[in-house]
Amino acid sequence: MTTTLDIHQILKKLPHRYPILLVDRVLAVDGGKSIKALKNVTINEPFFAGHFPHRPVMPGVLILEAMAQSAALLAFANEGAAPDSNSVIYFAGIDGARFKRPVEPGDQLIMDVTLERARAGIYKFKGTARVGDEVACEAELMCTMRSIA
């Protein structure tokens, strides 16, 4: 089954808020196995003032964060549960991150993330971020769901 999420539904699932919320829409979730999410990149992003004033480029760590937020949404879909105030998903590792093209204001960043493995609250994902047909970033992401209560 394919599901979409708008910004209001995303806000109910992720604890992130402006300026660190980096997913604007979920275009498709395929049964907890894969997700396709969208980030509209605008010149109004606060990081562009300093990165770089003469040639604005989205920082690579924020591209990875956008993929991780997409992965967190996928993990919740995989669990079939909504997050609560007693749990959070943290980054546990990043492997093989490669940046292939800069992401600039006006781009639409599409994150494709697939769940490779889920065991004992630890999730391994394969993520690709694209602008149009061009790959901007690829990485393997590990995340863990932890109780904070």
Image (cartoon, helix red, strand yellow):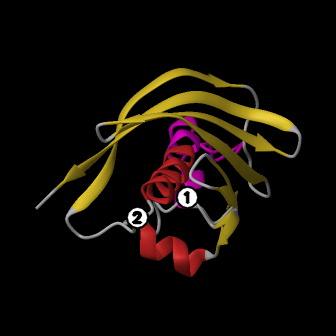
Residue for badge 1: 22
Identity of the residue furthest to the bottom in this view: 8
Q: Which class describes the residues within 10 Å of circle 2: few (<14), some (14-19), or many (20+)?
A: some
**Residue 15 painted magenta:** no
Q: Give whichever of discs 1 and 2 has the lower sequence position.
A: 2
Residue where numbered disc 2 is placed: 16
Q: Residues within 10 Å of mark 1 (few under 14, many from 20)?
A: many
Camera-nearest residue between 15 and 144 = 144
Q: Position of residue 77 (x, y in %)?
A: 50, 59
Observer-nearest of 21 and 25 = 25
Instruction: Name the image quarter holding the C terminus.
Output: bottom left
**Quarter of the view holding residue 81:** bottom left
Q: Quadrant of the N terminus?
A: bottom right
Magenta highlight range:
46-65
- Residues tagged 1 and 2 counted as in contact (Cβ below 8 A): yes
Distance (Cα) linking label 1 and label 2: 8 Å
